[in-house]
Image: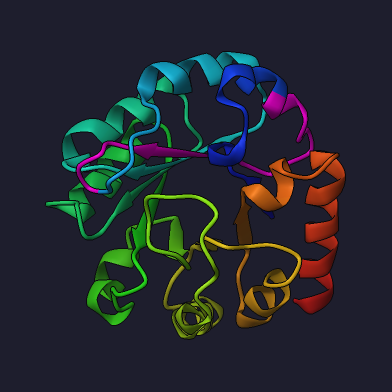
Amino acid sequence: MIAPSILSADFARLADEAAAVRGADWLHVDVMDAHFVPNLTLGLPVVKALLKATDIPLDCHLMIEDPDRWAIGYAEAGAYNVTVHVEAAADPVTLAKNLRAAGAKAGLSIKPGTSLESCADVLKHYDTLLVMSVEPGFGGQSFMAEVLDKVRTARRLVDTGHLNLVVEIDGGINEDTIAQAAEAGVDCFVAGSAIYDAKDPAVAMEKLRALAARSR
């Protein structure tokens, strides 16, 4: 699965940028609040507008403080998958249940420095694990290959039936890095500049998909 990240798109033309990646599995939306991470991007009003402009399921990644309070609104608006950070959620188990009750899949994200073992029990309540392969907050960072050990562990837990979730990765995914991430066991690849900086985003997206499929 490929989830183009609109963090690298033209914010003045988001409807057109979504149309440019028709055929994407998910459209990845980075919500940043300038508190949990230093950058500020967009929020619920823009997500609601995007939902009217595209049929691609929205994968909302909330890099925000107090997701227990704010995340439900994205699910209620119609986002397909709403991902919160384990480092920010006060009660991640209850939050997962509330997200599902509101109609969304529940995703849990972990920063590069957060161990998978520290949230293994919590992950049983989630539909998606988003492994950050850069420090959250900015696009265009270099891929951190050391996080692939967490991907391999997650893949093993899924394959043995201990977890039932999609393994997703976000950060520095491009033609040079997607193969090793696929080999480690990633199901869904978030890619921003590798897609939206290309002359033809749709062609770039499908090239990434082919590279991942060959390696997986």
Which of the two residues, 202 or 57, is positioned nearer the viewer here? 202
Which of the two residues, 198 or 150, is positioned nearer the viewer here? 198
Q: Position of residue 178 (x, y in %)?
A: 69, 69
Q: Residue at (39%, 32%) from the top-left corner?
A: 41
What is the total number of numbered labels drawn onto the structure image? 0
Residue 54: quadrant of the picture: top right
Q: Is residue 167 positioned above or below 128 on the image? A: below
Q: Is residue 27 magenta?
A: yes
Q: Position of residue 63 (x, y in %)?
A: 32, 46
Which of the two residues, 72 or 44, is positioned nearer the viewer here? 44
Q: Is residue 112 magenta?
A: no
Using residue 93 as the reference point, say whether residue 155 is left or right of it: right
| Residue at the limit of the structure toward the left, as seen here | 90
Q: Quadrant of the N terminus?
A: bottom right
Q: Position of residue 4 (x, y in %)?
A: 65, 44
Using residue 4 as the reference point, say whether residue 38 is left or right of it: left
Q: Is residue 214 positioned above or below 210 on the image? A: below
What colour-coding does the image apply? rainbow
Q: Is residue 196 positioned above or below 208 on the image? A: above
Q: Residue at (38%, 30%) from the top-left corner?
A: 75
Q: Position of residue 173 (x, y in %)?
A: 63, 62
Q: Quadrant of the C terminus?
A: bottom right
Q: Residue at (65%, 19%) from the top-left corner?
A: 15
Using residue 144 as the reference point, say whether residue 103 is left or right of it: left
Residue 117: quadrant of the picture: bottom left
Q: Magenta stretch?
A: 17-36
